[in-house]
Image (cartoon, rainbow, N blue to C red):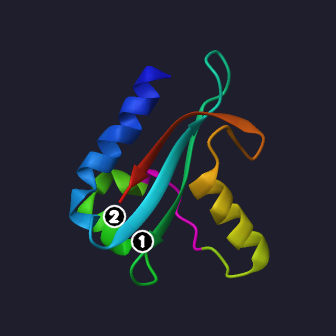
Amino acid sequence: MFMTCNAVGGFLQRSEAMRKYAFGVMDVCGAEGSEIIITGCWLFRGDSEKHMIEANPDAEYYTWTKAELNDETKARIAAYWCNEDDLEGRPIADSKVFK
């Protein structure tokens, strides 16, 4: 768990060039001894994650999906940005905000 949380922190530090162009929340979900996943929700200026991948080569190791604009997606984004205890049924072990 500790190494996973450090990996997320390092990813955010290496994304410094995107500071004026992006906002994101990355969560480490799961519990010690069970499956641990890294998930997040980002808002970029523009309509592509291309600039993030150029600024931080580690970004290509994540799966980036453009969200459709509808009520279900808005609720999911609010959950990513506001939840503190669990996310989609998984406990949040650590949460980091990039702003």
Which numbered circle lies on residue 86? none
Say which residue label 2 marks: 53
Q: Nearer the viewer, residue 17 or 62?
A: 17
- Give percent across and percent down for residue 51: 31, 72
For the point 46% across and 83% down, which residue is it? 47
- Disc 1 residue type (three-letter): Glu
Position above or below: 58 against 29:
below
User: Eyeballing the image, is 2 above or below 48?
Assistant: above
Q: Residue at x 66, y 27 (%)?
A: 35
Q: Position of residue 88 (x, y in %)?
A: 75, 47
Residues drawn in magenta: 61-66
Name the kind of residue labelled 2 in the image.
Ile
| Residue drawn at point x = 71 percent, y = 71 percent | 73
36 relative to 73 in the view: left or right = left
> Dot 2, crowdedness within 10 Å: few (<14), some or many (≥20)?
some
Verify CB contact (< 8 Å) between mark 2 and mark 1: yes
Q: Which mark is residue 49?
A: 1
Front position in the image: 78 or 3: 78
Element type at marker 2?
helix
Neighbor class of circle 1 (other Cα within 10 Å; few <14, some 14-19, many 20+) is some
Q: Secondary structure at mark 1?
A: loop
Q: Quadrant of the C terminus?
A: bottom left
Q: Residue furthest top?
A: 33
Residue 46 counted in the magenta span: no
Numbered disc total: 2
Instruction: Please name the predominant secondary structure of the magenta segment in the image.
Output: loop
